[in-house]
Amino acid sequence: MGRVNAVEISFTLQELVEISDDIKVEGDIYNCVTGIASLKDAVDGDLSFLGNPKYAADVKRSEASVIFLPFDYVGKAKEGQAYLRTASPSRALTILTLKLEHKLWPEVDPGIHPSAVVHDSANVDATSYVGPHCVIEEGALIGAKTFLQASVYVGRHVKIGGSCRLLA
């Protein structure tokens, strides 16, 4: 069986610091961050975060290269590790996952692929993308900046809002 080619995405410490304007850095890392894991499961190259104080004891033992922490966490980063202190570690992780999503799914030019079938009464916003072999039925509405991957079916009179991503 062949191996599936995976996309490797990484973040530098500087990119992580720039996620929020309130991040304070303690420590430094040797490599880029290439994964996200829990405090207990993290290894070198991973990012983790402390979103719930009941897991505070796990921070000290974590092997994560970078950890998002609240300002009031007491402790120091190990050699080759960086603590990124912020008002909301959970918010910082949310912003990071949005940036990750944009790297995994870059924006495409709007338009309707020639092989897509779109009913005359359907309304597809001009800023949206309809991929190959999609079918959009009678009276359907596709909102602004929505992305329909290849082979997506949209039934009669279905309304899809803006900035959605539908996968087959």
Image (tube, rainbow, N blue to C red):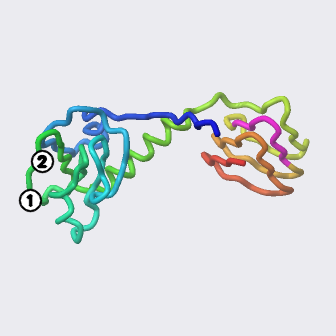
The dot on residue 132 is: none
Q: Residue drawn at (19%, 58%), measured in percent from left and top?
A: 59
Between 43 and 153, the one nearer to me in the picture = 43
Residue at the limit of the structure toward the bottom, as seen here: 54
> What range of the chain is rendered magenta?
129-136
Q: Quadrant of the N terminus?
A: top right
Name the front one of labels 2 and 1: 2
Between 74 and 61, the one nearer to me in the picture = 61
* Position above or below: 91 against 30: below
The dot on residue 77 is: 2
Q: Is residue 140 left or right of residue 6?
A: right
- Give yes or no for contact between labels 2 and 1 (Cβ–Cβ under 8 Å): no
Disc 1 packing (10 Å; few <14; some 14–19; many ≥20)? few
* Position above or below: 76 against 56: above
Q: Residue 84: where, in percent of width, then height?
A: 20, 46
Indicate yes or no whether the magenta region holds residue 147.
Answer: no
Q: Is residue 161 left or right of residue 16?
A: right
Location of residue 18 (image quadrant): top left
Disc 2 packing (10 Å; few <14; some 14–19; many ≥20)? some
Q: Is residue 144 left or right of residue 136?
A: left
Kind of residue at badge 1: Val
Indicate yes or no whether the magenta region holds residue 134.
Answer: yes
Q: Residue drawn at (18%, 43%), measured in percent from left and top?
A: 82
Location of residue 62 (image quadrant): bottom left
Inter-mark Cα distance, 2 to 1: 10 Å
Residue at the limit of the structure toward the front, as seen here: 1
Q: Residue drawn at (58%, 33%), measured in percent from left and top?
A: 107
Q: Residue drawn at (63%, 40%), measured in percent from left and top?
A: 145
Q: Residue 61: where, in percent of width, then height?
A: 18, 57
Q: Residue 20: where, in percent of width, then height?
A: 28, 43
* Position above or below: 132 against 137: above
Residue behind mark 1: 74
